[in-house]
Image: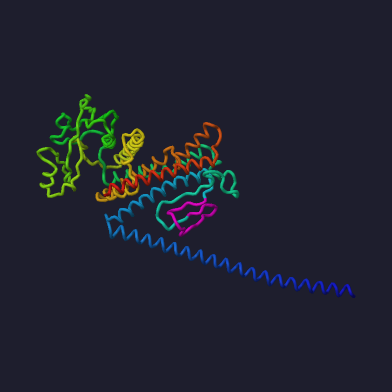
Amino acid sequence: MANTKENKNKKNTKKKVTKKEVVKAESVSKEEVKKEVKVEEVKEDNILKNILLLLAIIIFIVVVLVKFPNTVIWNIVVLLLMLTVLIFVHEGGHFLLGKACGVHIYEFALGMGPKVLGFRRKNDPTEYTLRALPIGGYCQLAGEEGEDDESLPKDKFMCNKSKLQRVLILVAGVTMNFITAIILLFFISLIWGSTDQSSVIGYVEDGSPAYEAGIVVGDEIIELNGYKISTWDKISIVNALKHESDTMEYVVRHEDGKEETYKLTPVEYALVGDENIRITEDHTLDDIAKENNLAKEDIQVSKMIGIGTSGDIKYGFVNSLSYAFKKFGSIVEIMLLTIGSLFTGKLGLDSLSGPVGMYTVVNQVAAFGLANILYLMAYLSINLGIINILPFPAFDGGRVLFVGIEAVTGKKVDAKIEGMFHAVGFILLMILMLYITFQDILRLF
């Protein structure tokens, strides 16, 4: 009997403890639920704030574009929108090739700053997000600088892909910028037409050094100061390079095939409206200003030998396609020449432009209509591509360089060393950008 009572007491005690534990567990569970609800409420509140912020920014952009054309704020907004599109396109290239090569991509974002919206597609681990600030975007690939997530399979890291796959992913952004530029140039020509890109002379100013030397319409410039010439774009950049003297040496091919060398010294011209007026001792800049009721400071003065293109506009699908590729090749050539001239000293750092300088270009270009804005966008797209493919730290080309070192040495460079290399390069780039921006600001005053 004693044993039976003992057993009953034990059972009763057991039951009482179990009830207390249940009550306690329920209390803890309710607290956790409350915390989770609060977290969700905070998240929803943040999302709502971010959506309102995005809507406010969009409304602001639309109002500025519609109501305040060709003002300071309009130019800034247009520049930011252009850069946003070009950066997003660039990152889109990395995204597409990353997916194609089987790299895990954490996030593909349009814009920067707080996340407004995000979603995942079925059977796709990537989060696609829209962020509040319409400035660029980014693609976050797994293993860009070493394995960074223990939960992922080894073959999902970019750093573990083949050398060819890594190079393709790295150059994909540049490729997309180049494709974007070609498409823009094609549509510019298709809608508004385009001029001939060859260096054939279509205009000779009466009384100019070129006219007095005997150069005529139809002649083709094939060399200038030792540089081979095939486009007017290259003529412009070679004219801007530092020279030992003011005399320019032109090699010209006449229509009969005969080649002749001319040594010409540019003279000053005043640009008044669409007319170039030569400045002489008998017809000074002051005289030109008085004749046209203009302030001397408002007249643009430049040195020229008095030649130009014909200005004839061509249309058509085939012409537009030809123009797009020729113009693309011409811009790439002059950009490479510009970069090379910076290293040789034929161009100074003061010839470069940062964000402030780009703003002033937008200001000048916008006055000539949409076609010129799209052309500037194509030019910036090529610029972005060329700069990014340079074998310099922090650029895509710098990362390609490390893949090349791996191919030569047969082993990977330590991820920490590569990361430090890119960090130092980024700091140097920021210092250069600050210097260029400072120079741009000085030129405004």
Residue 339 coordinates in the image, percent (x, y): 36, 37
Q: Nearer the viewer, residue 348 or 268?
A: 348
Q: Nearer the viewer, residue 210 or 90?
A: 210
How are the colours assigned in the image? Answer: rainbow
Tell whether position 108 is magenta.
Answer: yes
- For the N terminus, which image quadrant? bottom right
What residue is rendered at 54% in x and 42% in y? 416
- Find the residue positioned furthest to the top: 258
What residue is rendered at 45% in x and 59% in y? 116
- Is residue 374 toward the left or the right of residue 422 in the image? left
Residue 268 coordinates in the image, percent (x, y): 17, 38
Task: Please say if 243 is above or below 378.
Answer: above
Write down the region rendered in magenta: 106-128
Quadrant in which residue 427 is drawn: top left
- Is residue 272 toward the left or the right of residue 182 in the image? left
What residue is rendered at 16% in x and 47% in y? 296
Quadrant in which residue 379 is drawn: top left
